[in-house]
């Protein structure tokens, strides 16, 4: 099943490094498109397996748990959201099972601007496991969460821009906390070669109630084989956190990233063995091609 509309192509390539990303070179604007100029999506919110949605304005959330689904060149701009639930997700919440097959979300906007401030703050743009590439995700409480990721599927999170996060309430009480990107489980026990690659993204977490730009925590399961490479990490809290909570983690690698150094600082580790590889990580230096400021030492 394919739901599509024509989309004008652009010769502009999305930058390979996170510090080159802007709102103009990812998502719809890179393709010369905008949310308001796309035809409306008329399909079901629970998308059937095997569907491709291309060039549509989607005014609700999407349940992609059936798997084998591609969303591309589209705008997901919901007008309502359930507290604590994802705008786009790959979990079947009737059975709590993750998607059985690959989901791809690319060259799209996920936009919280039509939600109330409170609804936006209590929503996350994406929760689940998928390939997310060249998307512009903005105005939610949190951006991307790899969670309930199952045990089989690889995941590529590349060249996305998450920004404009918002918060509500007292973060020390019943208020919200923000992550631009987080991993809460990625189990490699049954498939040791499984991998999660987080490369060339710009993650900006500046809601005022910030956990941080990129937060890895074994909250809902073990995590293994994660590569964090050539991202720009900005905002409050810590820009990069690695936390061993209820489960173990292994083979965590951070290579060639850039940090704003704001908030509580670039990076921390709490529990567990720490980073298996920590190489070429620097503060972000504006105006330099490599954006290479002072070295950020291994936390």
Image (spheres, rainbow, N blue to C red):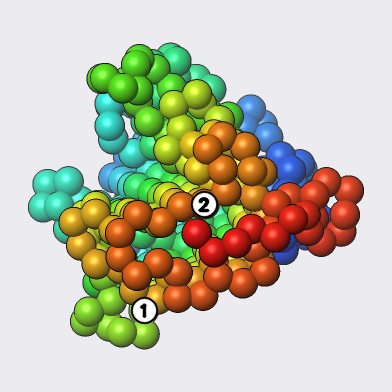
Mark 1 crowdedness (10 Å alpha carbons): few <14, some 14-19, many ≥20 = some
Camera-nearest residue between 239 and 71: 239
Q: Residue furthest left?
A: 95
Residue drawn at (30%, 65%) of the image: 272
Residue drawn at (36%, 85%) of the image: 193
Q: Answer yes or no: is residue 26 visible.
A: yes
Residue drawn at (43%, 14%) of the image: 116
Q: Quadrant of the N terminus?
A: bottom left
Of the image marks 1 and 2, the number of the one nearer the N terminus: 1
- Say if 122 sits above or below 190 in the image: above
Relative horizontal placement of residue 150, taking residue 285 as reference (left or right): left
Residue 194, numbered circle? 1
- Spot occupied by residue 299 in the image (x, y as percentages of width and height): 50, 59
Mark 2 crowdedness (10 Å alpha carbons): few <14, some 14-19, many ≥20 = many
Between the residue at mark 1 and the residue at mark 2, the CA separation in whole angstroms equals 25 Å
Q: Secondary structure at mark 1?
A: loop
Q: Are marks 1 and 2 in contact (CB under 8 Å)?
A: no
Snapshot quadrant of residue 230: bottom right
Camera-nearest residue between 37 and 192: 192
- Spot occupied by residue 53 in the image (x, y as percentages of width and height): 48, 51
- Say if 252 sits above or below 12 in the image: below
Relative horizontal placement of residue 149, taking residue 240 as reference (left or right): left
Residue drawn at (44%, 26%) of the image: 209
Q: Secondary structure at mark 2?
A: strand
- Spot occupied by residue 10 in the image (x, y as percentages of width and height): 80, 54
Q: How many marks?
A: 2
- Say if 55 sits above or below 57 in the image: below
Residue 72, numbered circle? none
Mark 2, residue position: 267
Relative horizontal placement of residue 166, taking residue 169 as reference (left or right): right
């Amino acid at each position: 099943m394919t739901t599509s509309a024509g989309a004008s192509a652009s010769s502009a390539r999305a930058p390979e490094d996170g510090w080159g990303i802007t709102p103009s070179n990812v998502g719809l604007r890179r393709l010369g498109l905008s949310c308001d100029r796309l035809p409306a999506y008329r399909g079901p919110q629970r998308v059937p397996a095997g569907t491709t949605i291309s060039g549509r304005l989607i005014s609700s959330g999407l349940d992609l748990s059936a798997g084998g689904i591609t969303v591309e060149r589209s705008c997901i701009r919901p007008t309502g959201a359930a507290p604590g639930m994802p705008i786009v997700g790959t979990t079947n919440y009737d059975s709590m099972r993750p998607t059985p097959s690959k989901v791809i979300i690319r060259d799209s906007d996920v936009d919280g601007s039509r939600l109330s401030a409170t609804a936006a703050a209590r929503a996350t743009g994406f929760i689940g496991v998928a390939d997310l590439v060249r998307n512009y995700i903005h105005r939610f409480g949190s951006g991307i969460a790899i969670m309930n990721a199952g045990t089989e599927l690889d995941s590529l999170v590349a060249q996305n821009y998450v920004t404009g996060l918002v918060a509500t309430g007292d973060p020390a009480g019943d208020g919200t906390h923000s992550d631009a990107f987080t991993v809460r489980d990625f189990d490699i026990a049954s498939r040791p070669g499984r991998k999660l690659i987080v490369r060339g993204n710009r993650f900006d977490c500046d809601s005022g109630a910030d956990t941080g730009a990129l937060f890895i925590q074994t909250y809902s399961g073990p995590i293994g084989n994660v590569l964090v490479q050539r991202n720009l990490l900005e905002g409050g809290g810590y820009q990069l956190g690695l936390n061993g909570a209820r489960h173990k983690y292994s083979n965590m690698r951070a290579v060639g990233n850039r940090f704003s150094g704001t908030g509580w600082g670039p990076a921390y580790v709490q529990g567990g063995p720490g980073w298996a590889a920590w190489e070429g990580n620097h503060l972000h230096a504006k105006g330099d091609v490599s954006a290479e400021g002072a070295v950020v030492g291994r936390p």
